[in-house]
Amino acid sequence: MITIALAKGRLAEQTIEILGKCGIDISVFSEKTRKLVLTDPTESFRVIFVKPADVPVYIENGIADIGVCGSDTLLEEDKKLYELLDLGFAKCRLCIAGYAGFDGAKTGAPLRVASKYENITKNYYHEKGENVQVIKLNGSVELGPVMGLSDVILDIVESGSTLRENGLAVLQEICPVSARLVANKVSLKTKSDEIKPLVAKIKNALETVNDRN
């Protein structure tokens, strides 16, 4: 049996749809239920639903063999996983945002950055050689500059509409973000006969979808 860790919500729905295109019976996985662990009728695949940041944790510790999460989560968590595929959906950008024209913190003061991505923020500004104070926020990060809590924010941006509605703008794009298929390194060896054919089917399913689009 292959155990797959999925982030609750749209990411899980899109992944399950792809699994269906691979010939897997996804009827159980698509049901409206509060159950967090589901197994397909053939008992070949088990899906566990977790929070996005926990997907790498379950995989690194061998509880799940493979899983899907955003590349932003992989950068932030920095777990010892093997990346198998860029799935190409759930695309967005990891950006620095704030008021247009913002030219940096006051002389001598650290730049205040509000973000849920503490590690990414620290690493990004460390490489730039800038003094930074990271303010951890778990939601409504845009409020940081609006309410004077921070100078800028570091967050994922899709359309940018939320930024614009709050008077903010993208100041710097750090990197593109998309859903990635990742695996436990040990599972890749011990369950190679099950995982590799599945990866090939997923890749083929993605190519078929892209060709149609």
Image (cartoon, helix red, strand yellow):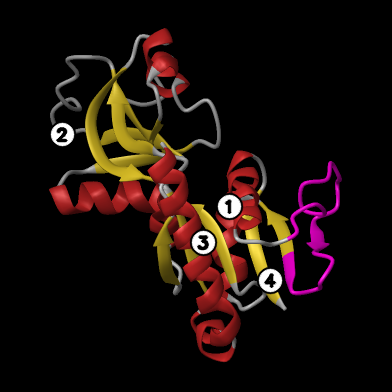
Q: Is residue 73 visible?
A: no
Quick one: label 3, few (<14), some, or many (20+) residues within 10 Å?
many
The residue carrying mark 1 is 18
Q: Nearer the viewer, mark 4 or mark 3?
A: 3
Q: Is residue 185 left or right of residue 66?
A: left
Q: Amino acid at mark 4?
A: Thr
Local SS, label 2? loop
Magenta residues span 25-46
Q: Amino acid at mark 2?
A: Gly
In the rendered image, the residue lying farthest to the bottom is 190
Above or below, comparing residue 106 to residue 186 in the picture? above
Q: Amino acid at mark 1?
A: Ile
Q: Nearer the viewer, residue 4 or 137?
A: 4
Residue 40 on the magenta segment: yes
Across and down, in percent, residue 115 comes to 42, 37
C-alpha span from label 2 to label 1: 51 Å
Which residue is located at x 47 percent, y 69 percent? 200
